[in-house]
Structures are given as structure tokens and as C-alpha cells.
Amino acid sequence: MKKDIYNFKINSPQPSSDDIAKHKDFDALLQQFRETPLPAEEKEPERKPRMVWLRYAAAAAAVALLIFFSKGLLTGEPSMTEQEYFASQPFINPPLEDIKPEFASQKVNANKGGVYEYNNGSKLIVPAAAFVSANGTLVEGDVDIKYREMHDFVDFFLSGIPMTYDSAGTRYVLESAGMVEIYAEQNGERVKMQPGKEIKVELISFVDMPRLNMSPKYNIYKLNTSTKNWEYRDIDNIQIIEDLESEGFENEELNNLKINHQSTLAKIETEEATLIRNLEASIPMPTEPSRPVQANKDQLSFDIDISENASEEVRALGQKYQSIIWHISPNSPEINTNALRVQWENMDLKPIDGKDYELTLINGAKREKVIVTPALTGDDYTKAMSVYQTELVTYRKALEDRELQLKEQRNSIVEKFTLQKDTAQKQYTSNIEAWKNANQDDPSVNQMVRRKIINRFVANEFGIWNCDRPLDPKDIEIEGDFVLDENSEVTNETAYLVNKNRNTIVRIYAKDGAKVNFDQKSDNLMWMVTKDNQIAVFRPKEFKEINEKKDKHTFRMKVEPNALKSEEDVRKVLRFKEM
């Protein structure tokens, strides 16, 4: 079904009693319809045919019949089911094309890998030699990691990522503790993860939960865009960092239990980190060979006569290659290039990292320091590259051998301390349960708290990963009709519904008679996007006024006047409390 096919026009004029009486003869009306010739097709119609949604307080059956025929003529399609409707839409379907969660970008040395921390404290731990090109060739050099996080219903809405999960014939809604999307590029071309490699993700996020719920349970899901479903991958390893907000209840016994538990965990984690650090230091990292630099005629370059007093490494370099041209390194501090034209009395040349060298020019007490890189030409460069390729194969093999040696021992250490942390957590949970059973009247029992957490998991391929849990909520179900302000049109027939107590979003096929499920004990918010980049909203106070004993309700949605130009604009409109 094409987008933009409907024109939602609401609050049309009420029909008079004479108008209604004219159409009570259904047989005559049907005959009139059949005998009326179809309009000639225009070569360049000014606009698409659109159906008008008519709203009458007590609609005559004749008018309903006209609407039925109009829909058949204008769309040429039977009414869709919700499943058919969403199947006809793009699977990932951002509703506001110019407003989406943005990607951060971080350069990664593909040869070495590393730990990359983002502004909010989230981390990606990238292994060495983790990427391959589209044809399977190992990627070397710098790679751009693209990374974005989505944390709340506004992020989920703007991303257009579906938040439902089908399992064993049941459709669940996914409540998220944080979602990420990761991919990588080199020179603008997408690369892939090398089989067997994993990026460790430490996602900082926030969840609301009862204060005495000490073990939030979430899973890790990967979005499969081919099968159009979320795939379960693992259990989310959550660590609670701190409590951020509470309702003001304090209890000394609870605080003491918490402090003692945190102290126990800190000791376990310190010992674990020390053992792993010592283990990794026991098998040194192999030295990565330095890739030769080819001389560039467009760069500032000069010759250096290597003296007999130079270091052994520098003299070996001079003996190995007949002629070396020296470039100013990009890592060099800014210098006055005129200094290189002065006759200096002496110099000192020291290797820094196998690639760059520190050159000190000396005139009496005067010193000028420059970072330089040796560059090669002709046969020297060809020979050096051949040696480098051989050394690189040896280096990678040494990296793999080191990792194999470390892996079993590291896993043994992690397993040992995971068991200790699990034991400490079980003891803490037992202590909390005992306190709760003995203090049922204490307000802390039902106290809600916002917690800062770390979601830890591994990503063995690029794409969208979600830390969440499936919900099968037993909410009120009501049949809904949808009414917008007069002359308002929507981009499609998708409505979005959120429950303040659940960090998720539900999409609804907003045709008349749609099934709307909501929790009347919570605050709920529902909206649609108009063609003018506005949002039409049905707010929490209006949900509270719904009579749950009735099986049908008309959702009269108010169009907010301002067009949406930024994420901030969206968040202002989609507040649970009106300003």
C-alpha cells in the first residue's frame, strides 16, 4: 500500500435530515452508482486520489455505503490487516527523514584494535585484525567505526526500528535497556567483521525499577533485516553502577546492606583485574613491524649523513638502504622550516617507535627538535615492502598464538570470579528479600528508582543490537476510531503508543476499528505524524477518561501547531506532562 494515499479530514459538516432522507432507498442508490460513468482519466492529474474520512455523530447507513464504494474506487484494494499493512511498509521506517539518532565516528587502527570510549562512557573494545573487505581480504590501516545509541521511546520512534518480537506464534513487545547500531567503513566502503572476531560492548544506559529489585533480567537480541525479526543471542550481563533518582525514602538498614555488597564486589573485581593484568604481562605483545614509507616528492624532504656515533638501530638502517630521504613526520611539532637550511654543527637521531625518529639539530647551546620519518625510493622501497609483508605474517601468527595461550587461562580466571560475584549477588538478594518480608509496611518496599547501568555483551557482526526483554502485557483492549483536527493529513496510517512505565514503543495500524491495548493504571501517550511535519497527540489525561467498560472509543488527536525541525522539538511535544 503506498504512503500518502489518505487525506485525514476531520469534523466535516453534519448532514441535514433532508440529506439523510434522500438516501434511504438503498436499491435506487446502488442503481444510480452503477449507471454513473467513471470520470475520464486525466493525463496529468494534479494530485493523487485520496479518501476522506467522514465523521458524523449518528451517521446514516447511506453515507456509510458511499464511503465503502469510495474506498473501493480510489484505492482498488481491500481493507488490510495490521500485519499486511506493516508488511507493505519499509521494515526500518524512520517517520521523520531529516531527524534521526546520529552516529558517532571513531578511527580505529585495524591492525592493532583498541578500546574506544564515547562521550557518555560507553565503550567498544575492538580486537586486532577484526575486519575484512567485501571480498574477504583482511583490512589494514585506519577504519571508521560508526556507532549510535538509542535509549528511550523518542529514540526508538525516530529510528523507525520495530520493537516487536515474534516467538512460537506469539508477538511480544520489547522493553529496552538500551540499543546500539554499529558498522565500519574504510575509504567510504563498508567492511565486515572477520569470522571468529568479536567487539566487546559496554553500553551505559538507564532503567527505572523497584528499588529492591536487585537483579534486572534482560537479554541480547540482534535484528535480522532479512527475516525481519529479532534473534535472541545471549543474556545481558548488567552491572548497576549507581542509583540516580528516588522518591526520597531512606532506610539505614537497606543502605548498609547495599554498601557492604558494593564493597564485596569491589574487592572481587580488583582481584580479578589484577590477575588478568599479570597474566597478560607474562606473555609480552609481539612487536608490530613498521610499514615502509614511500618517498613523496610533494613533501618537504632532506638528506641526513648518519655518523658513526649514531645509535646501532640508526646505523643499521643506513647500512641496509643505499639512500634514505627524510620527511617531516605528521607527528612532529610545528617548526620553522628555515631552521633546516641552517648549517648545524651537530645532530642527534634517536628512534621513537620503529617508524618515526627524533632529530635534534645542535648549534652550541641551541637545540631544534624535529620528528622525522625515513622514506624510500625505487628498489629500496620494493625490497623493504617485501620484508615487511613477511614480517607482518609472522607478527599476526604471533598475535594469534599469544591470544590462544592467554584465552584458556583468562577464561579460567573470569569463570572463577564470576562464580564469586554470583554468590555475593545471591547473598545480597537473600538479605534484601529477608528485609522486605520483615518490613512490608515500609515505603521503601515499593520505591521506584532510576539506575545507571552497564550492559555488557559481544557483537560478532555489524548491525542493530538490543538489550531488552519481551513483554506480553495483559492490558485493556479497545476498538478505536481516529479523529484529527480539521484539514490535517497524515503521512501514513501508523500511530505510536507508549506506556510511561515501559521503555518501549508500539506501532498501531490506525484504521477505524483498530485494536488499541493500553494499561489504564499507567500514563499512556499516542501520536501520529502529519504531512506538515507536525504531531497529532492523544495525551495521558485523555486516556484516563476512557470508559474501560465500553469496547469502543474515538481517539480525538490534537495537532500540535509547530513543525518539527529537530530532535529537541520532538521531545518537547512528546512529553507525558504538558508544559
Image: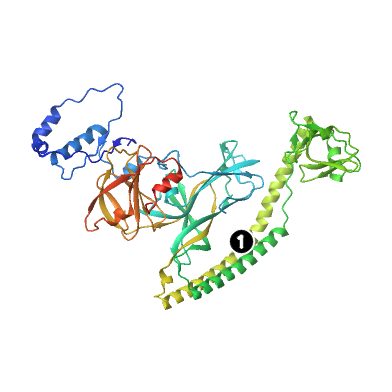
- Residue 95, image x and y in percent? 40, 41
Whether residue 153 can be seen here: yes
- Left or right: residue 561 compared with residue 184: left
- Left or right: residue 342 compared with residue 138: right
Whether residue 138 can be seen here: no
Most foreground residue, 151 or 28: 151
Q: Residues within 10 Å of mark 1 (few under 14, many from 20)?
A: few
User: Element type at marker 1?
Assistant: helix
Residue located beneath label 1 in the image:
411
- Left or right: residue 259 compared with residue 19: right
Most foreground residue, 471 or 449: 449
The image shows a total of numbered marks equal to 1
In the displayed image of the protein, which residue is found farthest to the top? 43
- Left or right: residue 97 compared with residue 182: left
Q: Is residue 51 above or below residue 464?
A: above
Most foreground residue, 553 or 545: 545
Q: Quadrant of residue 90?
A: top left
- Residue 341, image x and y in percent? 84, 32
In the displayed image of the protein, which residue is found farthest to the front? 579
- Residue 57, image x and y in percent? 17, 45
Considering the image in quadrants, where does the N terminus appear?
Answer: top left
Q: Amino acid at mark 1?
A: Asn
Q: Is residue 206 above or below residue 27?
A: below
Q: How is the image coloured?
A: rainbow
